[in-house]
Amino acid sequence: MNRLLAWLSRALRAALAASLTLCLAAQPAAPVHAATPEKILIMVGGIDKLIYLPAKLTEQLGYFRDAGLDVELLSQPAGVGAEDELLAGGVQAVIGFYDHTIDLQARGQEVKTIVVFGQVPGEVTMVATRAADSIRSMADVKGRTLGVTGLGSSTSFLTQYLAQRAGVPPTQYTLLPVGADNSFIAALRQARIDAGMTTEPTVSRLLKSGDARVLVDMRNVEATRAALGGTYPAASLYAQSTWLDTHPQEAAGLARAFVRTLRYLHTHSAEEIAAQMPTDYIGNDKALYVRALKASLPTYTVDGKMPADGPPTVLKVLTGFNPSVKGRHVDLSRTFTNQFVNDVRP
């Protein structure tokens, strides 16, 4: 009798379990929603400049999407304006010169570079052909007007430093903000400036037209060290430290996408890279764009890491001419991190 009761009890439990399973299976499954990535706005200090090529090229290659990111690129003609947008909270990150992170720390703002695009500035001081016979070096700029993208910009600090190394103090020449690209070319042609600092493809355009000649070239490591006394990391991706602390996955995704692009730049020809770019970036003269791109390729890092000797060189330049930095203690270790690029797999 006890055996029969035990058997009936087991059978009843089994029947109840089967019934419960059928009921659960009959209920509709809860819908699964894919997480929508947060929009990331990145301001570029002149998106047409070849020193910032990795920004648009990453978008064109689809690497932002592959990293699970929703990125929108915006553009400002100068890095100073991009920096202001970051501090105002209008954008989450900036692609501009690394030196802004030093300047901002000196003013009480914590900002870090997380990917270095340019191991050198990629800047070139061009002298108007009409003045080339009398301006043969930076020692000859006394009494002259020199063009920069903006007052307080990276080009203004670099120009002042080059002049000082040549023995010419800031009181003996004039800096004039003329922007970049077409506005820079117009200022040179209209004789509003005698020389000025600009980047590719503007450099190649001026050389082709014969309007200017190269005075100081900082498009490769050797020439940059000769001009500035060390490596000068420049074009980079930086963001406020508070954003990086609260968005580590997004920061890691950006590092992954941009390092992938830097590797692409070092494994493809200038012609192949140009083929990825929109027509309005290349312009009507594709051959000139390719030539400018070939001249720019040595500026890019391979892995996005900060060169060890770079930050001290940048600080030396800023200490001389940036009133925000002069006389202030700057902890260079807080102006950049290799954390995110170190985690990118080969």
Image (spheres, grey):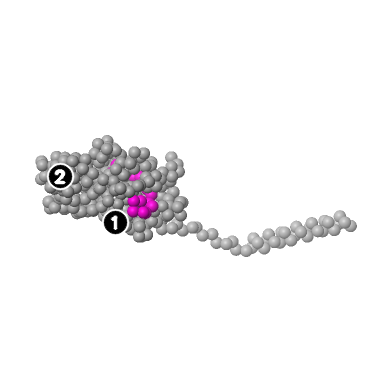
Bounds of the magenta segment: 105-121
The label number, if any, that marks residue 81 in the structure image: 1
**Judging from the image, what secondary structure is the residue with disc 2 in?**
loop
Q: Where is residue 332 in the image (x, y as percent from the top left)?
A: 37, 45
Q: Where is residue 180 in the image (x, y as percent from the top left)?
A: 22, 52
Between 331 and 265, the residue placed more toward the observer is: 331
Quarter the C terminus occupies: top left
Instruction: Give, as a three-letter code, the residue at label 1.
Output: Gly
- Real-space Cα separation, disc 1 to disc 2, in angstroms: 28 Å
Residue 320 visible to an observer of this rendering: yes
Was residue 98 drawn as part of the magenta stretch in this picture? no
Pick out the residue farthest to the right: 1
Residue at 45%, 52% in the rendered image: 245
Q: Is residue 91 left or right of residue 227?
A: right
Mark sitting on residue 141: 2
**Percent position of residue 20, x then y:** 70, 61
Quadrant including the N terminus: bottom right
Query: At 50% from the left edge and 58% from the top edge, which residue is drawn?
Result: 34
